[in-house]
Amino acid sequence: MDEIDKRILIETQINFPLCKRPFKVLADRFGITEEEVLCKIRRLKRKGFIRRISPSFDSRRLGFVSTLIAMKVPKEKIEDVANIVNRYDGVTHNYERQYEYNLWFTLISESNERLEEIINGIKEKTGIDQILNLPSLRVFKIDVNLIL
């Protein structure tokens, strides 16, 4: 990873340009071409340094509700259940944990009623009813910027 790669990682986290050609703006900042920036970003994605470049919205301010879900899934079914869970648009991410409730995911929707419909659909499709719905009572947002 060279110095420009590091600067790309920093700028995309902290100061990504919101304009018609953001990669051109980054290229001008770094003194390289837009195509070079795009090539570097593709390489950083391939190597796993960048997962995605996307906006982060405050879903509550946009009128959505969300919750954290924990499921108790038999070890041999974890991959199949995760694949079913991932088919729902409102699932932002999921992960396996080494606890009794071993599959956790976040779920976002336009209403609490719709959240319940999705949870019931997941129960029906997976055959698993040991699901904990853990909505947040208070929100704490911690901004993390990884500086290299």
Image: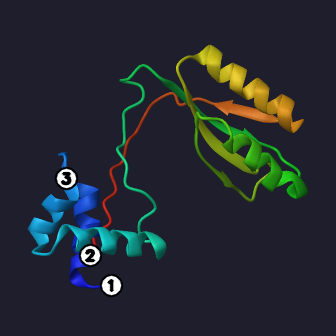
Q: Which mark is residue 21?
A: 3
Q: Nearer the viewer, mark 1 or mark 3?
A: 3
Q: Earlier in the sequence, mark 3 or mark 2?
A: 2
| Spot occupied by residue 88 in the image (x, y as percentages of width and height) | 66, 35
Drawn side of residue 101 relative to residue 27, left or right: right
Q: Which residue is mark 1?
A: 1
Q: Of the residues tagged 3 and 2, which is closer to the observer?
A: 3
Residue at the top extreme, as displayed: 113
Which image quadrant for residue 84? top right
Disc 3/disc 2 C-alpha distance (Å)? 20 Å
Residue 26 to residue 40: above or below: above
- Amino acid type at image mark 3: Arg
Question: Hey, what amino acid is under mark 1?
Answer: Met
What residue appears at the point 38 percent right and 23 percent down from the top-left corner? Answer: 62
Any part of residue 56 in sight: yes
Marks 2 and 1 in Cβ contact (< 8 Å): yes
